Image (cartoon, rainbow, N blue to C red):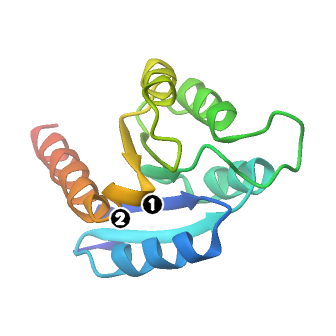
Amino acid sequence: MKTSDKLKVVIVDDSKMITERLEELINGLEGVEYVGCARNVPRAMFLINQENPDAIILDINLDAELPNANGLFLLITLRKKHPDMKILMLTNHSEPQYKSVCLENGADYFLDKSHDLFKIPETLMKIQKERYKVSIAS
């Protein structure tokens, strides 16, 4: 598979342990390419503009470089600028109100770090498969 056919993924999370685990999970997937991670909104925006990923794995809580610059702020910003980008919220805030706010603001998936981390590979493969079907049909 050519690099251009791969699903490019960026991780935005302030936990080094989580980003390392996600990187391990992603690197083992055929057709999926890990292109980098960021721990705060400014770095995430730079990386996203540079790499133009197809999917983002995004936490709600991020290192606070700017006031109110958290994962929800980034979700809203990304949805406006990149309507076709797939956004997977992965957070410890699994309460229904967080899920509702994220989905209402454009998240494609909402996963709980404590219980759903193992779903990341299958979710990314599903996105890649759907993306591949669309590119063949075009």
Calculate the distance from the C-alpha at mark 2 to the C-alpha at mark 1. Answer: 13 Å
Q: Which residue is found at the position 40% from the left and 81% from the top? A: 24
According to the picture, the residue beneath numbered tag 2 turns out to be: 4
Picture quadrant where residue 19 is located: bottom right
Of tags 2 and 1, the one toward the viewer is: 1
According to the picture, the residue beneath numbered tag 1 turns out to be: 9
Q: Where is residue 33 in the image (x, y as percent from the top left)?
A: 39, 71
**For marks 2 and 1 on the same chain, the one whose residue lies earlier in the sequence:** 2
The residue closer to the viewer here, 109 or 99, is 99
- Is residue 11 shown above or below 95? below
Q: Which residue is found at the position 44% from the left and 57% from the top? A: 113
Quadrant housing the C terminus: top left
Q: Which amino acid does label 2 sit on?
A: Ser
Q: Which residue is found at the position 42% from the left and 50% from the top? A: 54
Q: Which amino acid does label 1 sit on?
A: Val
The residue closer to the viewer here, 16 or 137, is 16
Q: Position of residue 111 (x, y in %)?
A: 37, 46
Structural crowding at the residue carrying mark 1, measured as other residues with C-alpha within 10 Å and reported as few (<14), some (14–19) or many (≥20)? many
Q: Along the horizontal axis of the image, is 73 left or right of 34? A: right
Q: Position of residue 34 (x, y in %)?
A: 45, 71
Q: Residue 90 carries which label?
A: none
The residue closer to the viewer here, 56 or 39, is 39
